[in-house]
Amino acid sequence: VVKAIGLIEHYRREKAERGGARVENLGERVSAARGFTPEGTELPPLESFLAHAALEAGEGQAEAWEDCVQMMTLHSAKGLEFPVVFLTGMEEGLFPHQRSTTGLEGLEEERRLCYVGMTRARTRLYLSYAEQRRLHGVDSYGQVSRFVREIPESLVEEVRPRVQVARPVSVGRFRLEEPAAAGVQLGARVRHGKFGEGVILNVEGNGAHARVQVSFERQGTKWLMVQYANLEPL
């Protein structure tokens, strides 16, 4: 792999001191990979080694930068602990990832990974999510992750925005304060002019900002603004 992607040649073209150190480090990794024996994993040998190497790197980083904010993936955080931990992107479709929600096995793996992240915190854990974000050039409205909703309310302290805005902001567990529209309720069957028939899975917001998540029979799951969707109750 190292030869195929030309990584050694790339490092050699860098400044002498830094490039030389990276070539030497890469050589050590290659030697370690040759003698590596996977244990207790179903991953292919190369993937297993890379996961092991990432864990070692994370441990070294934690020891070297104790007084700094560290950013890392959940996989690389395994085995580490910190006084305070921030988990971001706690939204349906991100965590758990959209692909994992189609099967029980994938969803449970995401739940275990979330547990790993949460238990990295010794004293304080912050979970954050965006009500709206732009992904792949498309603006989307997020729903708080089911992993957050599964936490007992007695253990959760909600942090509300300090700045007043012109419209209600959904926080915490996205409570619905008033009906979004007639016929728009969980479990209701509706018909859309373009997407066909489906079932309402979630309802968020109220008034002009109400939106619904509908599972359509042929078009999959979609989020729609109620005031523009013209949904017909069935």
Image (spheres, grey):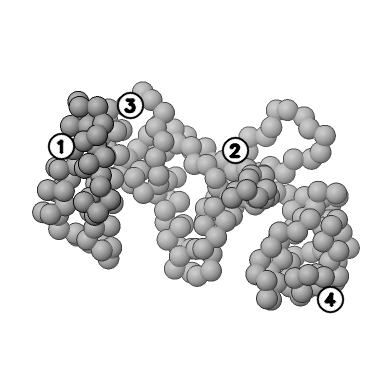
Residue tagged by mark 1? Answer: 24
Of callouts 2 and 4, the N-terminal one: 2
Please, which residue is most extreme toward the right here? 182
Q: How much space separates mark 2 and mark 4, taking CA atoms?
A: 40 Å
In terms of secondary structure, where does tag 4 sit? loop
Whether the residues at callouts 4 and 3 have beta carbons within 8 Å, the answer is: no
Residue that appears at 28% across and 45% down: 54
Of callouts 1 and 2, the N-terminal one: 1
Of callouts 4 and 1, the N-terminal one: 1
Task: Left or right? Give the position of 113 relative to 17.
Answer: right
- Where is residue 41? Give x, y as percent: 26, 62
- Where is residue 75? Give x, y as percent: 36, 49
Of callouts 4 and 3, the N-terminal one: 3
Whether the residues at callouts 1 and 2 have beta carbons within 8 Å, the answer is: no
Mark seen at residue 234: 4
Residues 72 and 163: in front is 72
Nearest to the eye among marks 1 and 2: give it: 1
Label 3 neighbour load within 10 Å: few <14, some 14-19, many 20+: few
Of callouts 2 and 3, the N-terminal one: 3
Q: Quadrant of the C terminus?
A: bottom right
Q: How much space separates mark 1 and mark 2, taking CA atoms?
A: 48 Å
Residue tagged by mark 2? Answer: 157
Q: Quadrant of the N terminus?
A: bottom left
Residue tagged by mark 3? Answer: 66
In terms of secondary structure, where does tag 1 sit? helix
